[in-house]
């Protein structure tokens, strides 16, 4: 499970295929990085109406899975949305990240955290 937040940039119409399969695509512009990213998501089958209450420019939070497949020697990746909701006021945009199942801090340790002060010597091992 992954999640991200941003502004709705585009919402497509529901596409129906001869097999009975339906899908609907939408684009969210994230601003958590230095450069904004336009991410295209899709909802399928009974999830297509999830987009009906949303408007362009609205802040949303998207929960999704990454799906990959191969077709005729070409590889494709889809961001399959399974939940979309209005962003909470004061919430910050988050980049796609795996769900954390523990309470470990996500900040990187400094080099001094990784070694004690007495662990380091300048001498070559040869």
Image (cartoon, rainbow, N blue to C red):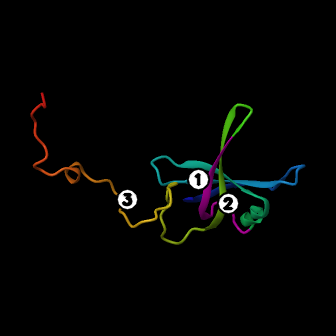
Relative image position of residue 49 (x, y in whole percent): 77, 65
Q: Is residue 120 left or right of residue 24?
A: left
Label located before the other in sequence (3 or 1): 1
User: Label 3, label 2: how many angstroms apart (C-alpha)?
Assistant: 32 Å
Mark 3: few/some/many CA within 10 Å (<14, 14-19, 20+): few
Relative image position of residue 38 (x, y in whole percent): 60, 48
Dot 1: element:
strand
Dot 3: element:
loop
Note whether 12 is above or below 92 in the view shown: above
Q: In this rendering, which labeled residue sits more in front, label 3 or label 2?
A: 3
Q: Residue furthest right?
A: 18
Quickly name the residue at label 1: 29
Note whether 72 is above or below 3 in the view shown: above
Quickly name the residue at label 3: 106
Q: In this rendering, which labeled residue sits more in front, label 3 or label 1?
A: 3
Q: Residue furthest bottom?
A: 89
Query: Tag on residue 56?
Result: 2
- Magenta residues, start to end: 53-69
Residue drawn at point x = 13 percent, y = 47 percent: 119
Q: Pick the residue in front: 82 or 125.
A: 125
Q: Residue furthest front?
A: 126
Mark 1: few/some/many CA within 10 Å (<14, 14-19, 20+): many
Label located before the other in sequence (3 or 2): 2
Q: Main secondary structure of the magenta part?
A: strand
């Amino acid at each position: 499970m992954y999640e991200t937040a941003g502004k709705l940039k585009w919402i497509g119409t529901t596409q129906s295929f001869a097999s009975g399969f339906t899908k609907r695509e939408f684009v969210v512009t994230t601003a958590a990085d230095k450069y904004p990213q336009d991410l295209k998501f899709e909802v399928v089958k009974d999830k297509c109406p999830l987009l009906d209450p949303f408007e362009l420019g609205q802040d949303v939070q998207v929960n999704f899975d990454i799906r990959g497949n191969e077709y005729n020697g070409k590889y494709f990746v889809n961001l399959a949305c399974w939940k979309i909701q209005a962003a909470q006021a004061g919430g910050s945009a988050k980049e796609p990240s795996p769900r954390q199942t523990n309470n470990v801090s996500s900040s990187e340790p400094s080099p001094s955290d990784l070694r004690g002060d007495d662990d380091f010597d300048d001498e070559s091992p040869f």
